[in-house]
Image (cartoon, coloured by chain):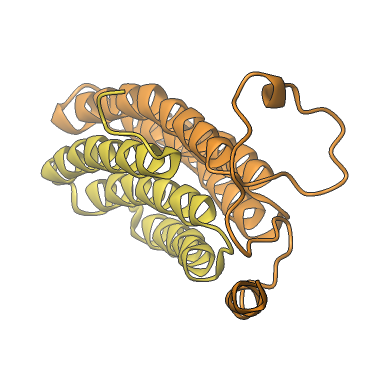
Chain colours: A yellow, B orange
Amino acid sequence: MDIGNFTWAAMALLLAGGYMCLYRIGKGPTAPDRTVAIDILGVILVGFCAMLSLLTGKDFYMSIAIAWALLSFIGTIALAKYLEGMGLDE
Amino acid sequence: MNEYVGLGIITVGLLFDLFGCIGLVRLPDVYTRLQAATKCVTLGTCMVLAGVFVFVGFNPTGVKALVCMAFVLATSPTAAHAIARGAYRSGVRMKEPVVVDRYKSAVPAPTPHPGVVVGEDQGDEEPVAAESARKGS
């Protein structure tokens, strides 16, 4: 079955969510607001990679999604530890 | 048949993603934004990945979608917990009125950020206020 239109609409929705995250990154009054928005942007882009994989039928987009999820997690943990004023081993 | 079930799951997941992002924009302070965004977006992305798995079945794309779903389910709540802890300990307060704050007795009193009025959504005026306060003292 042809799912081109569906995946394009899905990617448009995910991009709308991503732009809302970018708004919060730019606007957010405190540093934790921006950290939350960066974390959510990473998870949204994982879904975007899944939609790309459906659209093109290639499986390496899912590999990109896995790598992106793990790297986004590490970056968020580093930012949270920085907010807390601690090193990464405490 | 599997295709239609997968597309339905993906659609519900996309709606969860969108509502989570709307909550990220609309809610008043860090903790409410964290709650809305993290829960909705984690569930939404996991449903999108589950829908991809149901759609394509057992081939490399589907199995990678399952692995990615496990990663997102494990890492996203952990990151949210770390952010909430870091935000509280760095001195960001909840928006008034606060009903209950049991974490206050468990941590040493954090020093609030200079010039940050939490819950006040006008981010533009705060640096000016902070500088004038510093000059005044």
* B13 up-or-down from B102: above or below: below
Where residue B67 sits, quadrant-wise, is top left
* B96 up-or-down from B40: above or below: below
Can residue B8 be seen at all in this image of the molecule? no
Residue depicted at 51% across the width and 50% down the height:
A32
Residue depicted at 45% across the width and 57% down the height:
A14
Q: Position of residue B130 (x, y in %)?
A: 62, 72
Task: Tell me the quadrant of the picture where the N terminus of chain B can be found.
Answer: top left
Residue B102 as seen in the image, left or right of residue B85: right
Q: Nearer the viewer, residue A40 or B8?
A: A40
Q: Position of residue B131 (x, y in %)?
A: 58, 77
Task: Tell me the quadrant of the picture where the C terminus of chain B can be found.
Answer: bottom right
Q: Nearer the viewer, residue A52 or A24?
A: A24
Q: Residue furthest front?
A: B137
Residue depicted at 60% across the width and 72% down the height:
B134
Q: Position of residue B7 (x, y in %)?
A: 45, 40
Q: Nearer the viewer, residue B28 or A3?
A: B28
Can residue A42 be seen at all in this image of the molecule? yes
> Disc count in the image?
0
Residue depicted at 33% across the width and 59% down the height:
A4
Q: Position of residue B79 (x, y in %)?
A: 42, 32
Where residue B63 sits, quadrant-wise, is top left
* B75 up-or-down from B12: above or below: above
